[in-house]
Amino acid sequence: MSATAGAQDGTATQTGGDRLGFKPGMVIQELGWDEDVDDDLRVEIEDAIDADMVDGEFGNVVDAVVLWWRDDDGDLADALMDALTDLVGGGVLWLLTPKVGRPGEVDAADIAEAAQVSGVATTSTAGVSADWSATRLVAPKTAH
């Protein structure tokens, strides 16, 4: 479904929270918040889950993690490993980074390297706002 499909078929326009696959009742943990995050996207995510996002102090499992990350925030591989701490098996980690040309942009090669080091795989990317891109990361399935 395109973000503009609603205009033609009578359904609502897809929001950032919808594009990330969030549904009502999901518990979403938000990490890396700072003054520069996209507040409209945050509202769209909270509208999609019909609740507030939880922070790093939540202390329980979460369905997905939203990690806001900028180039100068430190070691991305470490941050990705930390972000997996509360994530339920099969959950998704969305890495939100400034788009190319924006202050704090993160090179795609750096994301790929950090993902490999932290043991997650990049599966897709999504444009979720004017200034932020989202990269979907998942932990590999383990054989039992």
Image (cartoon, grey):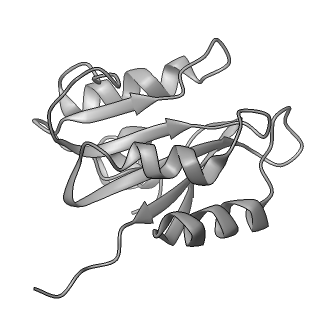
Q: Is residue 134 above or below residue 1?
A: above
Relative image position of residue 2 (x, y in whole percent) = 46, 59
Residue at image location 39% in from the left, 50% down from the top: 20
Q: Quadrant of residue 60?
A: top left
Q: Residue at x 23, y 81 (%)?
A: 142
Q: Which quadrant is home to the C terminus? A: bottom left
Identify the residue at horizontal 27%, vertical 23% (top origin).
54
Q: Nearer the viewer, residue 5 or 133?
A: 133
Q: Name the quadrant containing residue 83.
A: top left
Residue 106 percent location from the top left of the image: 77, 49
**Residue ranking furthest to the right:** 101
Q: Is residue 35 above or below residue 70?
A: above
For this rendering, which residue is in front, 97 or 46?
97
Q: Is residue 47 visible?
A: yes
Rendered residue at 30%/25% (across/down): 46
Q: Is 19 drawn above or below residue 45 in the view shown?
A: below
Quadrant housing residue 35: top right
Tell me the quadrant of the picture where the N terminus can be found. Answer: bottom left
Residue 106 as seen in the image, left or right of residue 69: right
41 or 58, nearer to the observer? 58
